[in-house]
């Protein structure tokens, strides 16, 4: 097939969850098909980054991204539009021109748009099947239910009502849709019950890149929290850990040390309890040395949607994991076998302390976690599943309405 892939995230270097997914999918599909990429960029990519992608892609075009600003005129006008405000405000004529120009130049069998931000540009390509890849809605849906503050809860409910109505109309324009987990599939089906052609395509991990650590390399009381704190979900999870859980761990293990990886600006680090007991590494191009160094990978997330690449990477690297139920949502696992699930602070602290003090438990979690990603979350197998879905849509096998 000839595929046009439209991405919100420039996929190289693959240094966050969205970029990792896009890069892995592009590389996998390009083994079998001609794939052209048009991507938004927040900063101009280096020539070297573009050259890496051109080693396996055809065209690689970039367009500057304009971030959503709620006070901008187009965003304010969005209050009176059936289209979500963020999509109105970030709509790019430059992206539209790039898509139109390439669609005139090339005849595509399939247009794949990655994430909801890119959906408006799909309609600019005629005579091609269209797939919306990685639609995520549970984060907004749950905030409309879980937000404790009445006024904010009302706002989130109005946002969810508007988004669900928009998706009902939007998905009529697409031949297929993918989501990363079963909870996401159920949420999308509630928005668009008429949608028949959807596949659960989970996130994965590059097993050749991650190799399990040697137990002898680990700090016996080293903990890690991975993820940029500029992402609200990560900061809220770390703040919960620092306030409610970390003091309980330090009471029994005063030598414990928490490494926090990823960008910190503009997160309000001054709000973090016991931050003097944390090491902020900043952005790391390669997480593997840190994952090999620590004894426990903590995932104390309270909100969010999709699935957590930080858990998949921990399993692949052989790092024992303690997570909240929300942090591990959407993944296939057995509590106590592949990781430990704990939602209450005291329960979470006890789980961390168990792993630190129990070599047999550490070994079991390391072995079983790695085996799980090898059988369920290998990117090669996942992209093959996506490829089968796209081929069926392109050929029209039982998929045209």
Image (tube, grey):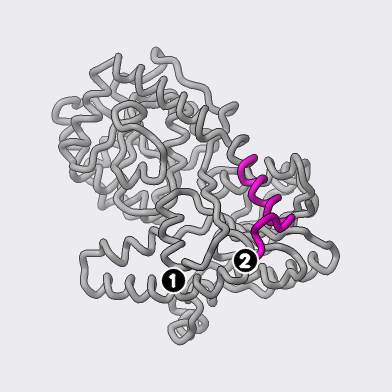
Q: Is residue 138 magenta?
A: no
Q: Going 29% across and 28% down the picture, which residue do you hit?
A: 336
Residue 347: give x, y in percent of width and height.
18, 36
Q: Which residues are magenta?
A: 383-401
Residue 358 drawn at (x, y percent)? 25, 17
196 vs 263, nearest the viewer = 196
Dot 1 falls on a residue whose secondary structure is helix
The rendered magenta stretch, by its main secondary structure, is classed as helix
Q: Does the image show residue 30?
A: yes
Disc number for residue 164? 1
| Residue drawn at 48 percent across, 28 percent down | 316
* Drawn side of residue 244 relative to residue 289, left or right: left
Look at the numbered disc 2 and give the secondary structure of its residue.
Answer: loop
Packing grade of label 2 (10 A; few <14, some 14-19, many >=20) is some
* Residue pictured at 68% horizontal, 68% vertical: 95
Q: What residue did someone put label 2 on?
A: 174
Q: Is any part of residue 8 visible from this angle? A: no
391 and 242: which one is in front?
391
Instruction: Tell me: 93 left or right of 68.
Output: right
Spot the residue most to the right. 105
Per the model, the C-alpha gap separating discs 2 and 1 is 16 Å
Name the spot of residue 245 as percent of width and height, x first: 20, 39
Q: Quadrant of residue 394?
A: bottom right
Instruction: Say which quadrant the C terminus sits in.
Output: bottom right
Q: Earlier in the sequence, mark 2 or mark 1?
A: 1
Which mark identifies residue 138? none
The quadrant in which residue 4 appears is bottom right
How many C-alpha atoms fall within 10 Å of the one at disc 1: few (<14), some, or many (≥20)? Answer: many
């Amino acid at each position: 097939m000839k595929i046009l892939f439209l991405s919100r995230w420039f996929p190289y270097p693959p240094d966050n969850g969205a970029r990792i997914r896009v890069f892995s999918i592009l590389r996998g599909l390009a083994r079998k098909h001609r794939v052209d990429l048009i991507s938004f960029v927040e900063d101009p990519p280096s020539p070297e980054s573009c050259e890496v992608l051109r080693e396996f892609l055809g065209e690689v075009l970039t367009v500057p991204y304009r971030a959503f600003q709620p006070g901008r005129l187009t965003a304010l006008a969005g209050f009176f539009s059936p289209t979500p405000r963020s999509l109105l405000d970030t709509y790019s004529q430059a992206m539209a021109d790039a898509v139109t120009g390439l669609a005139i130049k090339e005849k595509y069998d399939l247009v794949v748009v990655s994430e909801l931000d890119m959906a408006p540009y799909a309609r600019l390509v005629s005579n091609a099947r269209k797939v919306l890849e990685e639609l995520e809605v549970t984060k907004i849906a749950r905030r409309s239910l879980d937000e404790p503050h009445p006024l904010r809860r009302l706002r989130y409910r109005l946002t969810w009502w508007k988004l669900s109505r928009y998706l009902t109309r939007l998905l009529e324009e697409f031949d297929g849709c993918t989501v990363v987990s079963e909870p996401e599939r159920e949420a999308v089906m509630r928005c668009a019950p008429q949608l028949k052609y959807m596949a659960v395509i989970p996130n994965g991990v590059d097993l050749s890149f991650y190799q399990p650590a040697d137990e002898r390399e680990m700090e016996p009381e080293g903990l890690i929290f991975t993820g940029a704190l500029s992402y609200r979900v990560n900061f809220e999870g770390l703040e919960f850990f620092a306030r409610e859980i970390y003091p309980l761990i330090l009471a029994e293990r005063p030598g414990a040390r928490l490494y926090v990886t990823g960008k910190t600006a503009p997160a309000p680090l001054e709000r973090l309890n016991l931050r003097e007991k944390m090491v902020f590494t900043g952005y790391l191009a390669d997480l593997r040395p840190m994952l090999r160094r620590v004894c426990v990978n903590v995932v104390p997330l309270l909100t969010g949607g999709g699935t957590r690449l930080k858990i998949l990477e921990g399993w692949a690297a052989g790092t024992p994991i303690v997570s909240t139920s929300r942090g591990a949502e959407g993944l296939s696992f057995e509590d106590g076998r592949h990781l430990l699930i704990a939602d209450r602070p005291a329960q979470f602290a006890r789980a961390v302390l168990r792993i630190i003090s129990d070599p047999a438990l550490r070994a079991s979690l390391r072995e079983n976690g790695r085996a799980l990603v090898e059988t369920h979350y290998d990117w090669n197998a996942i992209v093959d599943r996506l490829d089968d879905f796209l081929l069926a849509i392109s050929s029209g096998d039982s998929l045209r309405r």
